[in-house]
Amino acid sequence: MRRATVFALGIMPYISASIVFQLAGPVFPIIEKMQRDEEGKKTLTQWTRYVTVVLCLFQAMGSPSSPSSSPAQSPTPGGHSG
């Protein structure tokens, strides 16, 4: 069931990883140089994929593993359990 959760995350982890590297360019001169170089772009694409896998794993651990676990985590409308 956990593997299905990783695939259910969609494209968002890749977009997040890509944004991280775009924002890191002005901060780290080496990344900014890589963004301009053709070979550096290939390396950054590879790094983005690795960071995507890491983000997927973290997000999958935070996702509920089954729909039946969600209601138990949400509070009742009246604020009491009875």
Image (cartoon, rainbow, N blue to C red):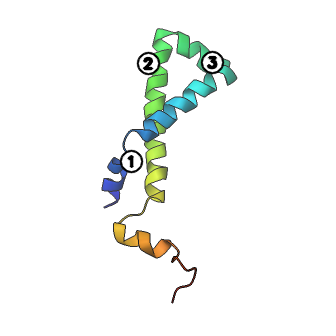
> Residue 19: x, y in percent?
54, 30
Q: Quadrant of the N terminus?
A: bottom left
Residue at 43% x, 27% y is 46
Check residue 30 in the rendering and tell me which mark sits there, or answer none: 3
Q: Earlier in the sequence, mark 2 or mark 1?
A: 1
Asked if the residue under mark 3 is in contact with the one under mark 1, i.e. CB atoms within 8 Å, the reply is no
Residue at 56% x, 84% y is 80
Image position of 38 with respect to 60: above or below: above
Asked if the residue under mark 3 is in contact with the one under mark 2, i.e. CB atoms within 8 Å, the reply is no
Q: Secondary structure at mark 3?
A: helix
> Residue 37: x, y in percent?
52, 9
- Going by the numbered disc 3, the residue's amino acid type is Ile
Q: Earlier in the sequence, mark 1 or mark 3?
A: 1
Kindly give the residue lying farthest to the right in the view shown.
27
Real-space Cα separation, disc 1 to disc 3, in angstroms: 31 Å
* Left-right relation of 82 to 64: right
The one of 7 and 54 positioned closer to us in this rendering:
7
Residue at which label 2 appears: 42
Residue at which label 1 appears: 9
Density class for disc 1 (Cα within 10 Å; few <14, some 14-19, many ≥20) is some
Image position of 14 with respect to 35: above or below: below
Q: Secondary structure at mark 2?
A: helix
